Image: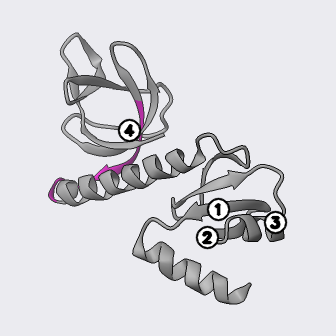
Amino acid sequence: MANIVLRFNTNPKNKDQLIGFFKKRIFFIVNNSGVTVNPGEYWECFIWAEKPNYTLVKPYKKVETEKVDDTIKKVTSFNDVLRKIETYMKNNPDFDKVIFDENNKSYIKTKNLKLKEAYQKYDSYIVKKLNDMIVVRPILTEDDRKEWRQLSQLR
């Protein structure tokens, strides 16, 4: 699941529906999204479902017009990290799925690994317990490296 920043406008074919565009792709808001989006507003959105001719998104955070460029950089960075995490996950039988902590930081949930076992097997990863799940995260940023050093000292 990736994020995107979109500006929504009224759909010329259906005045009750809002539409967004990005790189020649059409975006519609999912029904019952839980937020009220007005024409001309920018929103940070989850990509909900990709269809052949359009993509459904779920807006979750309104973006002020003057902060659009900074938000796009933040979202692009988030998507890059998420893509890297998904690459680490592929073809590894120990990994289950990507989950997010309360700060929207991505981790890989492990399958049936005990904490001690995860420490041994993935000693170059951030390994921790998150909501009673054993999760790992490869070191992708300088902040990750700092967190890994702190956690390594506690082992």
Residue 81 in which image quadrant: bottom left
Mark 3 or mark 4, earlier in chain: 4
- Looking at the picture, tell me which residue is in the foreground, 97 or 101: 97
Q: Which mark is residue 126?
A: 2
Q: Amino acid at mark 3?
A: Glu
Q: Is residue 64 magenta?
A: yes
In the picture of the structure, the residue carrying the numbered disc 1 is 136
Q: Is residue 134 left or right of residue 71?
A: right
Q: Is residue 29 left or right of residue 71?
A: right
In the picture of the structure, the residue carrying the numbered disc 4 is 36
Furthest residue to the bottom?
153
Q: Secondary structure at mark 4?
A: loop
Mark 4 or mark 1, earlier in chain: 4
- Looking at the picture, tell me which residue is in the foreground, 132 or 11: 132
Q: Is residue 102 visible?
A: no
Q: Secondary structure at mark 1?
A: strand
Between the residue at mark 3 and the residue at mark 1, the CA separation in whole angstroms equals 12 Å
Mark 1 or mark 2, earlier in chain: 2
Per the picture, the main secondary structure of the magenta-coloured stretch is strand
In the picture of the structure, the residue carrying the numbered disc 3 is 117
